[in-house]
Image: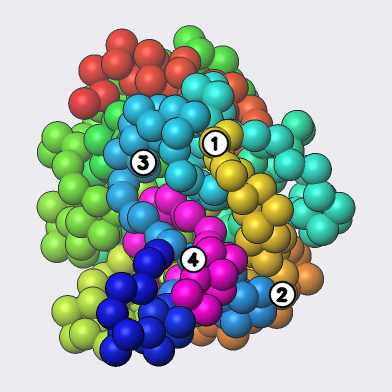
């Protein structure tokens, strides 16, 4: 930088003195598929604690993964946050993550909720619950995932698309428990029992059950909790008409999915990236996942105050390692395609 005019000398000197501080500013580039306003507290508190500013890019999981792949080694991404095991599997298989070995992470996050090689870690969980119309469906007829494919539920079932990661992760868990052939038979049965073709998100399924369009549906638990905490009269009315079931409590337990994160393969700020992942496993951050977005913390000792989660109560979760869901993700898509699960 060159100062030409005397009158600008003072201004130029001041500008020059700020250059080193600007160059040394700590910045973490975060690619996030989480679109929850309550996460703002996570980011701001991390910056307050560490002095590392977060530069956030938000998009859907598929868009983020496509961007990472296209950017390759030149990607500015340091940390990637995704909201489903199937999507983590796709990113891991594409070589978009780098392993992290951290005592802070391995000591707090259970082994079944992290990659064996440390390439990704879960930071919150959500269960795939059954929602049913209390006026038209008996709870005992829909208290397992398997029953959704039985003839007694003909014309009652509503779900998201069979290609949606939430459905694929459930199918991946069924493959691990029952094998591909049995899971394909289940998927065909669910398709035969549908009240309408798959469409919409989980909230749409819940509302469809409340209106009677559907008798029973699948939903991630935090969508249910969100409606339970709503002050809107229509949401209160919806939740009065539906019941919520933790499926398969008499055997393996309810299917659990995750929201997880990893250090990007391209990261130029690995130390800051690891520090951010470690922060997400702290008591403070884990509390935000529960209180803010109605998810369960992965650190079991975390205390939180969420009336909806408390009302839903405790349940037996399927202890299946998330790594098994990742392993079966591709097979799950093939099973759903062969079953005609659109």
Q: Which label is found at residue 283?
A: 2
- Tell me: residue 331, above or below residue 15: above
**Count of marks placed on residues:** 4
Q: Which residue is mark 3?
A: 64
Q: Earlier in the sequence, mark 1 or mark 4?
A: 4
Q: How far separated are the C-alphas under marks 1 and 3? A: 14 Å
State the CA–CA distance, disc 2 to disc 1: 29 Å
Tell me which segment is drawn in magenta.
16-39
Which of labels 2 and 4 is toward the front? Answer: 4
The residues bearing labels 3 and 2 have C-alpha atoms spaced at a distance of 28 Å
Residue 5 or residue 326, whichever sits in front:
5
- The mark lying in front, picked from 2 and 1, is 1
**What residue did someone put label 4 on?**
54
Disc 3 and disc 2 in contact, CB within 8 angstroms: no
Q: Position of residue 146 (x, y in %)?
A: 46, 33
State yes or no: residue 32 in magenta: yes
């Amino acid at each position: 930088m060159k100062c030409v005019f005397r009158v600008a000398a003072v201004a130029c000197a001041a500008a020059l003195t700020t250059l080193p501080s600007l160059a040394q500013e700590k910045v973490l580039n975060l690619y996030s598929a989480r679109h929850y306003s309550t996460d703002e507290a996570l980011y701001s508190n991390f910056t307050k604690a560490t002095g590392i500013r977060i530069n956030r890019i938000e998009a859907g999981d598929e868009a983020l993964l496509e961007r990472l792949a296209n950017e390759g080694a030149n990607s500015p991404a340091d940390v990637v946050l995704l909201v489903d095991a199937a999507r983590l599997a796709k990113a891991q298989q594409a070589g978009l993550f780098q392993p992290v070995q951290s005592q802070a992470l391995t000591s707090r996050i259970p082994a079944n909720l992290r990659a064996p090689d440390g390439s990704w870690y879960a930071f919150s969980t959500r269960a795939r619950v059954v929602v049913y119309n209390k006026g038209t469906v008996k709870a005992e007829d829909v208290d397992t995932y398997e029953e959704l494919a039985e003839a007694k539920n003909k014309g009652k079932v509503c779900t998201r698309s069979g290609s949606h990661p939430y459905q694929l992760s459930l199918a991946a868990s069924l493959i691990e428990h029952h094998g591909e052939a049995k899971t394909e038979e289940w998927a065909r049965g669910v398709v035969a029992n549908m009240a309408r073709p798959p469409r919409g998100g989980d909230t749409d399924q819940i509302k469809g059950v409340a209106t009677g369009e559907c008798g029973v549906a699948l939903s991630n638990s935090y969508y249910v909790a969100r409606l339970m905490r709503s002050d809107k009269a229509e949401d209160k009315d919806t939740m009065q008409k539906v019941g919520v079931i933790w499926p398969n409590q008499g055997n393996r337990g309810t299917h659990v999915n995750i929201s997880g994160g990893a250090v990007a393969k391209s990261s130029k700020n690995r130390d800051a990236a690891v520090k951010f992942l470690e922060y997400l496993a702290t008591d403070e951050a884990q509390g935000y996942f529960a209180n803010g977005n109605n998810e369960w913390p992965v650190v079991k000792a975390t205390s939180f105050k969420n009336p909806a989660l408390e009302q839903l109560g405790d349940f037996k979760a399927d202890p299946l390692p998330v790594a098994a869901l990742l392993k079966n993700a591709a097979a799950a898509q093939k099973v759903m395609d062969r079953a005609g699960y659109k």
